[in-house]
Image (cartoon, rainbow, N blue to C red):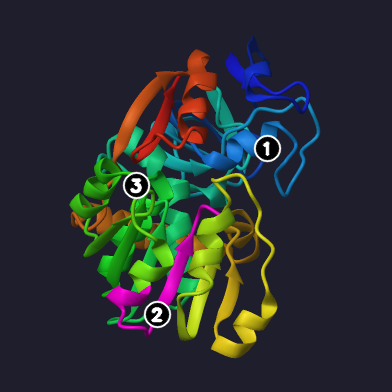
Amino acid sequence: MKAIVCNEFAPVSALKYEDVPNPVAKAGMVVVDVQAAGVNFPDSLLVQGLYQMKPEVPFIPGSEIAGVISEVGADVPHLQVGMKVIGITNLGGYAEKVAIPMNQVMPIGDAIPLDEAAGLATAHATAHHALKQRAQLQEGETLLVTGAAGGTGLAAVQIGKIMGAKVIAVCSSDEKCQVAKDNGADITINYSRDDLKDTVKSLTKGKGVDVVYECVGGDTFHACSRVMAWAGRLLVIGFAGGEIPKFPVNLSLVKGFSVVGVFWGSFTQHQPKDFMANMKELVTWYAQGKVKVVVDQSFALKDAVEGIDKVTSRSVKGKVILKP
């Protein structure tokens, strides 16, 4: 089969489109023929050796896929060949086939188009876990989302509205602000034009925001840390801007807010029952029209480098999908 292979930690441009052996469904696993794979910002960090985990090389990147089961291993009672599924792969998703443990596979039937299903897994699941388990977002609270036109930012906007929050979306252009507004944001801030800290303080009449879903890092994180409400929760999602900020802990002490790390990949391993319950809730919301996956662009698998570059350039509005 064909796959995108990282043979050494290097720039994204060094990834290779190669022939690799077909995976085998061992006990407790299934093989899925990949119809669509989601591209996520951490994929670029992973192949450069800059992510929290460093797999042994060579490896195939890609953490979320949708496709059809083509092989079922022993001791898998509830999955069958021919089922359409979402799969959480951790690694291996940028390929024509991938072997996945059965507890990381969820049947979806015909409820969701497969390209959208591939984009539902990581971005929406991260936002869901962050707002539900980590922030414990309450109805009536104010949620600020940075990077709000990206895949996980848009997901946070949608899910924040479902959970009853007032959502402020922060984006780098008017075009991106409109995308966030189209997905449910109550208020948008173009931080390339308006001062983020001053604008948020004005909008909240000095109270600050209860929860921040922070994807960007750098100066954006620093501004957010200065607009937190009492007992607020500043969620650390990622650093799409490139700079990992240093946090002055006295701010947390004086303002009484919490800085909360969100690592969805670890959540799926440490709390598998909660993870699967979250996924079932997400699929239900999708079927009810409460959440949607905005696919910005699809690329052929062989053009994965272009797809990753689009995500890392922060020009994407929604999700980028690879199709073998």
Separation of residues labelled 3 and 2 (CA atoms):
22 Å
Query: Which sits earlier in the primary sequence, circle 3 or circle 2?
Result: 3
- The kind of residue tagged 1 is Leu
Residue drawn at point x = 54 percent, y = 24 percent = 97
* Residue mark closest to the camera, 1 vs 2: 2
In the rendered view, would you say 248 is above or below 22? below
Front-most of 192 and 113?
192
Q: Residue furthest top?
A: 19
Name the kind of residue labelled 3 in the image: Ala
Q: Amino acid at mark 2?
A: Gly
Give the quadrant of residue 211. Answer: bottom left
| Res 316 → quadrant | top left
Eye-nearest disc, 1 or 3: 3
Say which residue appears at 49% left-offset and 15% top-offset: 303
**Picture quadrant where residue 258 is located:** bottom right
Rendered location of residue 80, percent (x, y): 44, 38
| Label 1 SS | helix
How packed mark 1 is, by other alpha carbons closer than 10 Å (few <14, some 14-19, many 20 or more), is: many
Residue 295 visible here: yes
Residue at mark 1: 46
Give the CA distance from mark 1 to mark 3.
Answer: 23 Å
Which is more toward the observer, 84 or 65? 65
Task: Identify the image quadrant of the N terminus.
Answer: top right
Q: Which residue is mark 3?
A: 149
Q: Residues within 10 Å of mark 3 (few under 14, many from 20)?
A: many
Q: Secondary structure at mark 2?
A: loop
Q: Earlier in the sequence, mark 1 or mark 3?
A: 1
Q: Which residue is mark 2?
A: 208
Task: Answer with left or right where residue 67 lies relative to residue 241.
Answer: left
